[in-house]
Amino acid sequence: MASFTKRNGRWRARVRRSGHPPITKSFPTKALALQWSQRVENNPEGFLPEQHTEDYQLEVLGDLISKYGKDITPKKRGRDKEKYRIRVLERSFLSEVPLKALRAHHITKFREDRLKEVSAGTVLKDLGLLSAVINTGRTEWGLENVLRTNPVTLVSKPKAPRPRDRRLEPGELERLLAACPNPWFRPVVHFAIETGMRRSEILFLICENVYLDQRYVHLPDTKNGESRDVPLSPVALELLRDLRSNKNPDQLVFPIHYEALKSAWRRACSRAGISNLRFHDLRHEATSRFFEKGLNVIEVAAITGHKDLRMLQRYTHLRAEDLALKLG
């Protein structure tokens, strides 16, 4: 006999059978929980946990997505953002599609449905995660005979949006900072503008990697997979002197959670009457200021961590007459 309970947005199925210990498993939807309970009830050996195999458990795409979210996502630096995308995939109709029946037209429908709700850039990230989930199932979890191809690779992708070029308007920074009472909001925003560091790099910075005498912070693990040393401006240096005092080496410099910062940013922008400004725009603002101070592309890339220098070309506006002067 099966019973179902909903907790924290997920459905938990519990199957009991005489002479066997109960088996439980959670799912993003009740339909998936019901399907699983019926499979277990129709298979007596399903009550022997040691006989469960990955192939048995991973029968619908929702199983694969949930396993990826549990086993792989927590190991990533950008896990907070990815957890949200995992929930999006779990709550979509894709979760109920059997792995054996998964085809490109399912991905196409998901793409079109999402494009009605979010931007093309967001859909591209959703499809990228979905592709990673399927590839992991095929290469790591023995599903290569079930998923013979990755259907995400077979569908066309939305056109990537043009890079944002939003910069702070005069007075916006002051209004933004004045609109948020969170004590960690102001130093995080100031530090982002002074260093050009990504949000995740700032929030994971620990005191041990701050070198005040040498005027830099060390980032051992960044988005592009390489370590980086970020020089500190006088403003950034003074910020860290205050924040780092009386802290242990393994403590976070900025003890604010990603979700808390996200909420504080949203509220501050609303109260300040500022529209179309994202936290990542502060990295663009910082990079623009580096070029305005006279740093060249190589120097800026060393600070920001851009591996592809073409990403920085939009910040430079080289005129032919200026280049002619450099040629002598």
Image: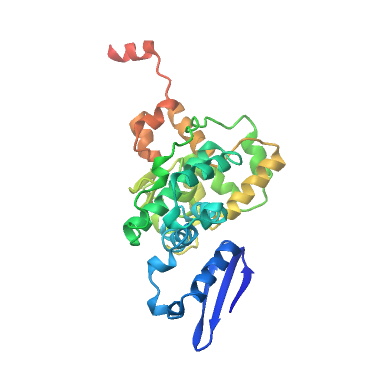
Question: Can you see residue 193?
Answer: no
Q: Position of residue 289 (x, y in %)?
A: 48, 31
Q: Residue at x 53, y 45 (%)?
A: 110
Quadrant of the image containing the C terminus: top left
Work out whether residue 54 or residue 128 is closer to the camera in this orientation and state it.
54
Rendered location of residue 261, percent (x, y): 58, 51
In the rendered picture of this protein, how many numbered marks are placed on residues? 0
> What sort of colour scheme is used for the picture?
rainbow
- Judge whether 164 appears above or below 180 on screen: above
Quadrant of residue 316 within the rendered picture: top left
**Residue placed at 35% from the left, 35% from the top?**
308
Looking at the picture, tell me which residue is in the foreground, 26 or 184: 26
Residue lying at 47% horizontally and 30% vertically, measured from the top left: 288
Q: Residue at x 69, y 42 (%)?
A: 270
Q: Above or below — where is 316 with respect to 273?
A: above
Residue 71 location (% of width, % of height) = 42, 63
Most extreme residue toward the front is 42
